[in-house]
Image (cartoon, grey):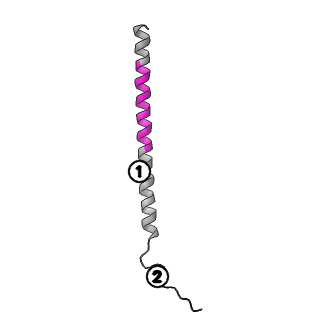
């Protein structure tokens, strides 16, 4: 294998690794945002005392 082909291969390999890292970073950011949104939704759904008293006489 000549030097120019090896250099091209190494450059493409490095670019591929950098792209994979950038994509994984975006996936992690999205997962964190989804988790935070889920926590906010569950906090909003919890109302203290809701459902404790039921009027069974109609």
The residue sitting at 42% across, 52% down in the picture is 33
On residue 32, the disc is: 1
The residue sitting at 43% across, 39% down in the picture is 24
Chief secondary structure of the magenta span? Answer: helix
SS assignment at label 2: loop
* Residue 57 in picture, x, y percent from top left: 57, 92
SS assignment at label 1: helix
Magenta span includes 4: no
Residue 25 found in image quarter = top left
Write the start and end of the magenta stretch as one range. Answer: 10-27
- Quadrant assignment for the N terminus: top left
The residue sitting at 41% across, 36% down in the picture is 22
Residue 10 found in image quarter = top left
On residue 16, the disc is: none
The residue sitting at 42% across, 62% down in the picture is 40
On residue 52, the disc is: 2
* Residue 37 in picture, x, y percent from top left: 44, 57
The residue sitting at the top extreme is 2
Mark 2–mark 1 Cα distance, whole angstroms, equals 34 Å
Residue closest to the eye, 38 or 56:
56
* Residue 44 in picture, x, y percent from top left: 44, 67
Residue 43 found in image quarter = bottom left
Q: Nearer the viewer, mark 2 or mark 1?
A: 2
Image vertical order of residue 53 relative to residue 20, above or below: below
- Quadrant assignment for the C terminus: bottom right
- Crowd rating for badge 2 (residues with CA inside 10 Å; few <14, some 14–19, many 20+): few
- Crowd rating for badge 1 (residues with CA inside 10 Å; few <14, some 14–19, many 20+): few
Image vertical order of residue 50 relative to residue 5, above or below: below
């Amino acid at each position: 294998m000549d030097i120019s082909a090896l250099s091209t291969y190494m450059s493409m390999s490095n670019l591929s690794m950098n792209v994979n890292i950038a994509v994984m970073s975006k996936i992690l950011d999205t997962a964190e945002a989804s988790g935070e949104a889920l926590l906010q939704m569950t906090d909003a759904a919890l109302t203290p005392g809701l459902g404790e008293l039921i009027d069974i006489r109609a």
